Each structure stands twice: as C-alpha cells, then as structure tokens.
Image (cartoon, helix red, strand yellow):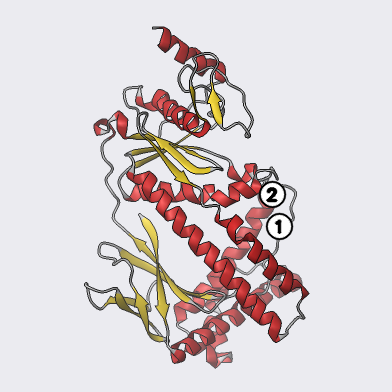
Amino acid sequence: MIRTCQYRIYPNKKTTKILNYTIELCRQLYNAALTERKEAYRSSQISLNYYSQTKELPATKLENPELNDVYSQVLCDVVKRLDNAYNLFFNRVKSKNRMGKKAGFPRHKSRDNYNSITYPQSGFKLIHKSKSTNKGILQLSKIGDIKTIISREITDGDIKTCTVKRNKIGQWYVDLTVEFPDIVNKPIEDIKEEEIIGVDVGINKLAVLTNGVEVKEIENPKLISKYEKGIKTLQTLLSKSKKHSCNRAKIRKKLAKKQLKLANTLKDSLHKASNEIVKSGNIIVIEDLNVEGMVQNHNLAKSISDGSWNKLMDMCDYKAENAGKYTQFVDPRDTSQLCSRCGAAVKKDLSIRIHNCNNCGLTIDRDLNAALNIRERYMRLAWNSVKMPVDAPTTAYSIEQVGAMKQEDTSS
C-alpha cells in the first residue's frame, strides 16, 4: 500500500539558498532537454526518450560543471519528469474524451512554474530526534540537514522517494512516498448490518450519513464562497498593476497567501469530514458520481466545487483502506427521486429539500432519503445475496424495478 506523507521543513538561510540554486539548475536542465527533443525531431525526425537523454547526462555535466552540485539521481528525475510530460501529452492526443480541446504540448518552465526536486531512490534520510516531540532532521545529499516537523512518525513503512517543494509564498515541504504493509480487512461475514453506512453528498449539507437507524449530518462550510470576495479583489488589482513592478509582486504574494489559506482550510475541513464518515461504520456506501460532468452545469458548478465532492470521496476511499474497512460505490441514478420506504417515484427538482411521498406518507429530509436509498441499493445488490464480496459488479435498477421490489416487500 503506497501513501504520501507530507511534512513542513524549515531550511535556514544557507540551505534555502542551496535549495533555490538546485531547483534553478534543474529547471534549466529541463528546458535544455525539452529544446533538445524538439530540435532532434525537427531536424532529423528522431524521437528522443528518457533512456537516450539520461545516457547524455555525464557529457552534459562535463560541459556544465555546475550540475555536479546536484545529486545525480535528482538530475535523472528531471529527465524523467520531461518524459512523463511527453507521455501525458500523447495520451491526451489519443484520448477521445478531450471535449474538443486542443492538447497542450510540453512547454518550457518559468521560475514560477518549477518549484520542486525529487530524490527517486536514495540520497535522503529522515531522522526523528525524539519520540516525545515532533522534531526531526531531513538529510539531503549535496544540500545538507533541514529542520523538519514530523507530525506522524513513519514506523512500519519503507520510504521510496523524497520530493522537496516550495510553494508560492516561500514555504518549504517534503513529500515522502511510503510503502506500508497491506491492511487486512475485517471479514465481510463478520460485519453487522448496522455497520453499513449510506452517504449522500450534497450542497446545503456536505454529507448526510445513516446506518438505517442513526443519522449524522456534516455541515458544508462553503469556504470558497467565504474567500471568494477577497480573492477576486486581489485578482482585479493584480490584472490592473504594471507588469514587473514591485507593487505587482506584493499583490501577487498577498493573493498567493489568500489562496493558500483557502486551500489549507478546505483540506482541513475535508479531512475532518472524511474521518467522521470512515469512523461511522465498516462499509461506507457512496454514490459513484460523475463530478466532472456535473460541474458542466453552470448553475451547480460553484456549489459542487464548494463542497469538493471528488476530494471528499477520494479521502474516504483511502482512509477506509487504511483502516481495514470497505468503500462501495453504487449507481447514483434516482436516489433522490425514489421513496426510501415504499420505492415510489417522487419527482422533485433541486429547490425542493423535503421528500414527501403521497404513496406511503413518508416525509423526511431529501438528503436523508437519498442516503437511505444509497444504503438500500448496496444491501439489495450485495449484502442480501449471501453477503457477496463488495467488489461484485453492481446492477442499475430502474425506478419501476426498485419500486416493485420494495412494494412487494411491504405487501408481504
């Protein structure tokens, strides 16, 4: 199981200067390698790749002695990064889901757009000074020791790669890719029905979850709306400021701080929400929503982005895996339109927030009704079939089929 652990690092002035110098050399190498690829294809129709350019690195270092100040594997990773950019470009060209947009060719990196270096195998070491504190040291070859705040100690994992990056306001972080032992999930046969949680994500409430008896609601903080005015004001000032002026640089830094504050606050709220969801049960049932398609609706795009549904579902997925629990995605069609008690179709638009069934008289919150239907859909597809594995293929029932099954259950 591969996970990424991110820590804040605090390089001193000397180390910061070395880090910035190293990133700049890597940026120049990236641009030179991109130019070489373009020229080779333009002049001789030769397509260079990662291996051919890596073989040239020793000769490049002889021509540019300053590259000896950079760890050799970091330089190899720069060429690998360019190779990945080319592969992604060709994948976008071949993809049929580009929605008519032109695939962007890899471009030269400016100083503002190249802010990280990666040690892919070796040349780094993380040392935790004391178990009672979160203080540590990150040792980087050709750079030195950097003070690190270790918020979570890595005790049972094997660190594979190390990426040091700088954000737009000059803060430094390290991302460690760690391979952890696989978690053994609780046997499906030992899970009780009350441990199955249906989760409905929404606009007014970030999520409503239920096990069929108890109900929890997670409020949507709507952080994007809260920060939107300040960000728009700074963006307007930035667009009107003179290019390359000191005032423009100040405004850009203020804007970056504001955007970073929004990103960190949003990430914190999503972590808290996903933790609460995963702790609620052993099987987390979520709608398999096409969020990318839904945001094409301009009336909903802002509200959906405010809730960050994709990020929330991804967090729930990997946190459930870490905890030895299951995440099951079910077909989202008509979960809001069906009555969770009798299965009758109750058509309603988004402005109607209460589910009121004329067939059985059920009146409950719209999101709770959807959460009950999501849970029930999983129960019918997998759980009631002698506890089939949660990765069993799902079947999308129509309104008439589900309604008929539920009405048959109630009549019997």
CB within 8 Å, label 2 to label 1: yes
Along the horizontal axis of the image, is 228 left or right of 405?
Answer: right
Residue found 55% across the figure and 39% down from its top: 289
Vertical side of 282 occupied by 117: above or below: below
Q: Which mark is residue 350?
A: none
Q: Label 2 belongs to which residue? A: 98
Rendering coords of residue 53 (x, y %): 57, 75
Residue found 51% across the figure and 21% down from its top: 339
Vertical side of 327 occupied by 79: above or below: below
Amino acid type assigned to the residue bearing label 1 in the image: Ala
Rendering coords of residue 338 (x, y %): 53, 23
Residue found 26% across the figure and 30% down from its top: 189
Secondary structure, mark 1, is loop
Evaluate whether residue 321 shows in this view.
Answer: yes
Q: Earlier in the sequence, mark 2 or mark 1?
A: 2
Q: Which mark is residue 103?
A: 1
